[in-house]
Image (tube, rainbow, N blue to C red):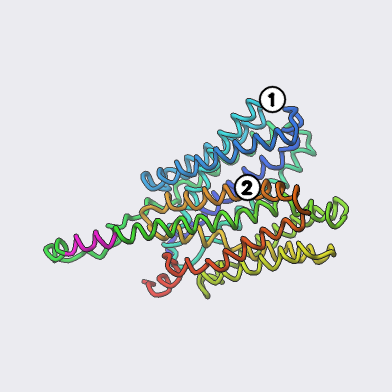
Amino acid sequence: MNDSLRAARVATFAYFILCGTVMGTWVVNIPAIEERVGISHATLGGLLVLLGLGAFIGMQVAGRLTDALGARVVVPATGVLCSAALVLPGLSREPWTLAGALLAFGFCNGCLDVSMNAHAVHVEKAYGRPVMSAFHATFSVGGVLAALVGAATASAGLTPAAGMAAMGALGIVIALASARALLPAAPTAADTGSGSGSGSAGEAEQAPAAERRRAGAGAGASRRIWVLAALALMVMLCEGAANDWSALHLKDVLGAPASTAAFAYGTFAATMTIGRLLADRLVARFGSMPILRYGAASAAVGITIVAVSPWIWAAFAGWGLFGLGLSGCVPQLFSAAGHADPAAAGANVSRVAGLGYVGMLAGPAVIGWMTHLVALNHAFVLLTLLCAITAVAAGILRTASDPTPEMATSSH
């Protein structure tokens, strides 16, 4: 690999860490901001819907902008905007100002999320082997860094606004410093053809047939993208449920002390990060479809153990297996969406990421609603069902533009 491609990969890592750190910085400051604004948990829950709405809108806008202008322009710009918008919730003192701040922050975060994933698809295609899961692992690392920095700033007596402004300023520097290493715009479908030579008449004769094939392929690709998006919704709904309910499960259902219950989410997050660090090598060897199928099946087993086990140690094992199983699923869905049509990678990733984000936000709410009808651990059976459906439907990646088989046979 040449130095410019390696630099582009490093820069992509930087943006994923940036995005994870910025979002994590907001998360760790939620309690302090909630107290300062003087709102209840219920009001905060309503305001968080605006964060999700802003992110969803931003994802759709950024997808089209990335395809039109190129990730080299959109990724740094959204990285700067997202870092700058981080301070807005910290400055809010009234519910209505916090509402506007979360809408703006969510929009900027959604823009960065989709544009950097679209660029990651281009890097993966140029690299000739799977690298997407490692990018998503560094997003998780960013969240860990945010937690450490947040604890340090809180112990130092800094206000949320000061700590978030400092992290935002650092994020702007990272976004600008990493910009030059990004890849130029991806080639369009026309650019990737092998139209060299002198057969212009033959090309003219083949054009109508090629257009018809492209139109048919486009319709099929569109349907495939929405199937991938539906799978992303199910997988990320499971992830969102684990984020909010894992610790509460140990505390409320199994009677673990709060200090012990906190490790339930830690176990889930740790195995998810480890799994994403390992997933690229497994994809290179076995392909993306088995990673999605067996990962989702393993997650189904893990959450079933959580749902039925009366023992704390078994619950930890179940949450760990759940995180490990889910770890490689979302990167494969994003990668398949981006490779389906390199010229529309941004738009396709925005559809999959957008619907997936809806699932991430809906997960905690759906489980919470179900607890009015059944016990919390019994509500987790829904997650088992969603993981099982994902495992059964994983064959969609056989017909998607899975890069691994092509990459293996097209080395230069």
Horizontal side of 89 relative to 349 (left or right) equals right
Magenta stretch, main secondary structure class: helix
Task: Check the image and report above or below for 184 versus 158.
Answer: below
Residue under the image location 55 percent in, 54 percent down: 13
Which numbered marker is on residue 362? 2
In magenta segment, residue 353:
no
Element on which disc 1 rests? loop
Q: Compare residues 369 and 176 and report the one nearer the observer.
A: 369
Residue under the image location 61 percent in, 60 percent down: 386
Q: Answer with the quarter of the image where residue 406 lies.
A: bottom left
Q: What residue type is labelled 2?
A: Ala
Task: Check the image and report above or below for 290 versus 48.
Answer: below
Q: Compare residues 157 and 221 and report the one nearer the observer.
A: 221
Q: Do the residues labelled 1 and 2 touch (CB within 8 Å)?
A: no
Q: Compare residues 408 and 46 and report the one nearer the observer.
A: 46
Of mark 1 and mark 2, the one earlier in the sequence is 1
Image position, residue 384 (x, y; %)? 67, 63
User: Is residue 176 in sight in this rendering?
Assistant: no
Image position, residue 36 (x, y; %)? 75, 28
Image position, residue 97 (x, y; %)? 63, 26
Image position, residue 98 (x, y; %)? 64, 29
Q: What residue type is labelled 1?
A: Arg
Residue under the image location 74 percent in, 51 percent down: 245
Q: Answer with the quarter of the image where residue 92 lies.
A: top right
Q: Compare residues 295 and 149 and report the one nearer the observer.
A: 295
Write the start and end of the magenta stretch as one range.
206-214
Which numbered marker is on residue 93? 1
Q: Which residue lies furthest to the left in this view?
A: 201
Q: Answer with the quarter of the image where residue 188 lies.
A: bottom left
Element on which disc 2 rests? helix
